[in-house]
Image (cartoon, rainbow, N blue to C red):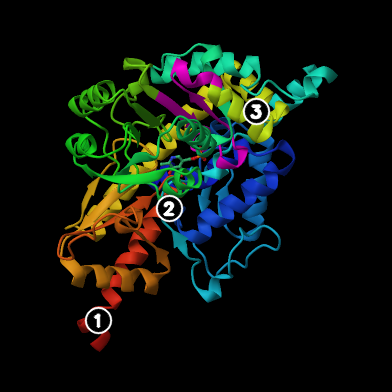
Amino acid sequence: MDVSWTTAAWELLLPVGAAPARGRGRLLRAALREAVRGGSLPPGTRMPSSRDLARDLGVSRGLVTEAYAQLHAEGYLVSRQGAGTWVATPRVRPRPHPGETPAGPPPTTGPPPVDLRPGLPDLRLFPRTAWAAAQRRVLDRLVHQHLGYPDPRGLPELRAALADLLVRRRGVAVRPDDLVVCSGVAQALALLARVLRDRGHRAVAVEDPGSPPEHGLLALAGLRTVPVPVHHDGIDVAALAAGPARVAVVTPAHQFPTGIAYPPPARAALLDWARARAGLVVEDDYDGDFRYDREPVGALQGLDPEHVAYTGSVSKSLAPGLRLGWLVAPPDLREEVVAVKRLTDLGNPVPDQAALADLIRGGGYDRHLRRCQRAYRQRRDVLVAALERHFPDARVSGVAAGLHAVVEFPGGPTRRAAMLDGAARSGVRLHPLADYRHAGAPPPGDDGPWRVVLGYAHLTPGEIERAVRRLAHGVLAGRPSAARR
Ligand SMILES: Cc1ncc(COP(=O)(O)O)c(C=O)c1O
């Protein structure tokens, strides 16, 4: 029973500690009910002592005692004086508690759909308390003059904090003045694209499969995107060299969407190409903070800052809604990038920049990353185990890093149709790898294995386990023998 407690139920409760203090009691009670109703805490599970749970969640013991008492009164938990607390064996299904059930259709209409889309962190883990405290401190400290138009390169204190962070965590070669704060990787690419177009570039090589929205964004700046195949060892550098582009946008730490990490020879070959062509590698380090088998591989930019532009953001580490990122362009492009940034939007919001600087400086950002890293690694393991159990012939790859994996199902078009049918029947949304192919790339053969990109970081272990099980049942229900039964 302890095993189920530490996996699925724990993940449901984890956001409680990060919630604003005022809503924590309500959230804890709702999460406990959801864990019991959803089966993450099966009947008979022994609950941790209120002291232990309070310590693990970082909340007061009184809050946990109250929640246990309330759920005891409602029939979800049973307790014996001095002996402990257990999940009750339900005689009748407990009624949902008004106002405290998570959003979604009522249970009678079946479980809500699950979207296994890649690219989202768990927004429930956003460090609300730490962020709110940082904003409070910042607003106390900022003088009126600081609320004027900011330096378009970004607040000096944030650039200093980011430079330290990127040197330490990602091996980027950067000083505070080399860096431009921007609204995510998306804006970094838009700024660079504009500068490159002004310098006469007309084509940019992109990974295929890759990120179609990025292709659209580059096209908007007047650049033609040239798809270059990605193999098991990264972008095909020979194909890149044979093409017209002198700029290549790549994701070497965890290729999007295949999930491979470029091995050292591929990284070296890419840099050789850029030097030989007097070209530029644009390194999109969108989820480079999360690596599970060892320390994250250092950024390519650290090996050759003259030929690599490095960009990243807090979209995977904190939340995409913050729209905060950074760009380290090679020295000869920097001033042009700053000029375009100034003309585009006059800089990013000051309070948010200052709050991020405060969070990084105070250690809260690293703490949050460690917490997410632990949670996401566990979720990845749960996904892999669930796939092994329910789809033993599937091959999982791309799991060493990031927030998503790639799963390959053998069996050609018949299997693909069965999987898609099963997904539709079970309400589990799948994202085929083919959806990430470049619009101008040659169509793939139809008889190879069928590959899907599975995002797991935004779901709790229990949700992942249930999604894979539902999918397996959906596929099974569509088999001719099942239909006859
Ligand atoms: C490959 C890739 N790069 C970058 C991003 C993030 O962009 P931004 O930092 O603008 O949110 C994403 C978002 O999903 C992505 O898939």
Magenta part of the chain: 309-335
Q: CA distance from mark 1 to mark 3?
A: 62 Å
Could you tell me if the residues under marks 1 and 3 are in contact, i.e. CB atoms within 8 Å?
no
Residue holding disc 1: 482
Residue holding disc 2: 462
Q: How dense is the environment of label 3, judged by Cα within 10 Å: few (below 14), some, or many (20 and up)?
A: some
Above or below residue 482? Residue 132 is above
Residue holding disc 3: 342
Indicate yes or no: mark 2 CB to ligand 1 under 8 Å. no
Residue type, numbered disc 2 = Gly
Asked if the magenta segment contains residue 42, the reply would be no
Residue type, numbered disc 3 = Arg
Measuring from the top left, give residue 331's x and y in whole percent.
46, 15
Q: Nearer the viewer, residue 398 or 180?
A: 180
Q: CA distance from mark 3 to mark 2?
A: 46 Å
Q: How dense is the environment of label 1, judged by Cα within 10 Å: few (below 14), some, or many (20 and up)?
A: few
Q: How dense is the environment of label 2, judged by Cα within 10 Å: few (below 14), some, or many (20 and up)?
A: many
Residue type, numbered disc 1 = Ala
Measuring from the top left, give residue 399's x and y in whole percent.
29, 41
Q: Say which element carries label 2.
A: helix
Residue 229 lies left or right of residue 112; in this view the side is: left
Q: Nearer the viewer, residue 396 or 174?
A: 174
Q: Say which element carries label 3.
A: helix
**Residue 82 seen in the figure:** no
